[in-house]
């Protein structure tokens, strides 16, 4: 099937890391600037940015490099705007974007100001009509601009809903994780809907963060955990017992953990290209997508890090359709079902369901 088709259908992205989704061209531009300032050696990083195959360990080295390039307020704002526009331009209608709030004393950055820069990036999206849980003032501002005879084009632009998840990095302390959860609670009116636990799975113990994750849950935030990127069965069992609202990856589950996952019905965020590129799964032919799909286990196709892995959600749909023999109808249903597993408010979920129903009827899918 044509790539155009996968681009054209409405899609839902629930597992995308902000700094992993930055365009190569932006990273190269930022690297050049830092090179000119003598902060890095451009020739050293150019080939790293353009490299395609990375082991799991190399991927985390790559993130350290990306963070050197992106972690100042203006750049965080820029990449947020670009990432949202990139997803919207391939017809992602709901994007749950996750990012790790960062403190960087040398740039005067706190976790709070980092997140303000992210939200500023959402505000700057202008090529699309963005809904990111507007506060009253912003609603008012938007209202006034639209009342000017749609001068801003706001009403005719394609719409994308964006909600945010704040990530806890496994390298962090419990105290730092708590700060992230409190920040998420403070920013609920700006579209923060949940907490993610991510970072190098070979580093740290997930149990360090349990008090923060429990607190998040008690306060009504949803939780998703990176689970089973490496074969640590004790950790996998502990995570499944916690019953997160979703998990990411679920690659290295031995039989009893697999059974537990199936019984739990916890939705799984599947990132095909990421798993293959990092060699977490040896080939698409043996990917657990097939088993989950055939047993109707809740699953969502996602990109993980579209920049780092040179992919897009449309490409992931194309890959899944080809590898698992799924047709247009099945793939459309997959996208539609993802709405159910989003952490958005009921109103958004129901608007999205209506939207998918309309498209389905229109194209007799
Ligand atoms: C685990 C991952 C990841 O938060 O700085 N991240 N964590 N497994 C993965 N699979 C490949 N991909 C990305 O985005 C980058 C951060 O997301 C997490 C890592 O902590 C990485 O540093 P933000 O916007």
Image: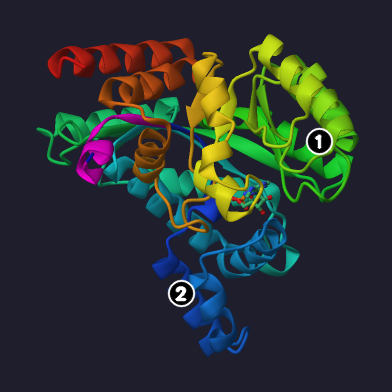
Query: Is 231 in the magenta?
Result: no
- Where disc 2 sits, the SS reads helix
Which residue corresponds to the image point at 64% horizontal and 17% vertical from the top-left?
Answer: 266
Q: Looking at the picture, how far across and down is residue 286, in whole percent?
A: 58, 37
Q: Position of residue 66 (x, y in %)?
A: 59, 65
Residue 215 shows in this picture? no
State if disc 2 and disc 1 touch (CB < 8 Å).
Answer: no
- List the single residue furthest toward the left: 149
- Give the answer, above or below, for where 170 lies relative to 295: below
Residue 194 tag number: none
**Was residue 10 drawn as part of the magenta stretch in this picture?**
yes
Read off the residue under disc 2. Answer: 28
Mark 1 or mark 2, earlier in chain = 2
Q: Nearer the viewer, mark 1 or mark 2?
A: 2
Residue 35 can be seen, yes or no: yes
Q: Nearer the viewer, residue 358 or 33?
A: 358
Q: Is residue 178 left or right of residue 27?
A: right
Which part of the image, by quadrant, shows the C terminus?
top left
Instruction: Give left or right: position of 248 versus 219.
Output: left
Look at the image and give the residue range highlighted in magenta: 2-12
Question: Which residue was labeled with disc 1?
Answer: 178
The answer to which quarter of the image holds residue 38 is bottom right
Left or right? Give the position of 365 relative to 77.
left
261 left or right of 316?
right
């Amino acid at each position: 099937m044509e790539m155009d088709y996968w681009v054209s259908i409405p899609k839902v992205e629930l597992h995308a890391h902000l700094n992993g989704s930055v365009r190569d061209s932006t990273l190269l531009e930022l690297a050049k600037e830092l090179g000119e300032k003598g902060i890095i050696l451009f020739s050293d990083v150019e080939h790293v940015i353009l490299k395609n195959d990375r082991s799991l360990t190399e991927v985390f080295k790559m993130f350290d490099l990306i963070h050197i390039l992106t972690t100042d307020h203006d750049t965080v704002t820029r990449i947020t705007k670009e990432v949202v526009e990139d997803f919207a331009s391939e017809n992602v209608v709901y994007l749950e974007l996750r990012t790790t709030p960062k403190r960087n004393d040398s740039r005067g950055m706190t976790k709070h100001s980092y997140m303000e820069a992210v939200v500023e990036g959402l505000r700057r999206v202008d090529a699309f009509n963005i809904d990111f849980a507007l506060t009253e003032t912003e609603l008012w501002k938007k209202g006034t601009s639209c009342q000017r005879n749609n001068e801003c084009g706001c009403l005719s632009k394609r719409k994308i809903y964006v909600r945010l998840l704040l990530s806890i990095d496994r390298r962090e302390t419990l105290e730092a994780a708590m700060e992230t959860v409190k920040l998420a609670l403070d920013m609920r009116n700006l579209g923060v809907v949940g907490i993610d636990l991510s970072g190098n799975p070979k580093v740290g113990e997930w149990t360090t963060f349990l008090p923060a994750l429990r607190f998040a849950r008690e306060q009504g935030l949803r939780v998703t955990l990176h689970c089973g990127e490496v074969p640590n069965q004790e950790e996998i069992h502990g995570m499944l017992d916690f019953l997160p609202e979703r998990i990411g990856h679920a690659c290295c589950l031995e039989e009893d953990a697999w059974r537990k996952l199936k019984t739990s019905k916890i939705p799984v965020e599947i990132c095909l290209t990421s798993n293959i590129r990092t060699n977490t799964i040896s080939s698409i032919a043996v990917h657990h997508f097939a088993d989950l799909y055939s047993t109707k286990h809740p699953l969502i196709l996602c990109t993980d890090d579209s920049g780092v892995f040179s992919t897009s959600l449309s490409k992931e749909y194309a890959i899944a359709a080809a590898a698992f023999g799924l047709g247009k109808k099945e793939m459309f249903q997959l996208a539609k079902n993802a709405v159910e597993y989003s952490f958005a408010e009921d109103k958004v979920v129901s608007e999205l369901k209506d939207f998918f129903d309309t498209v389905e009827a229109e194209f007799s899918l």
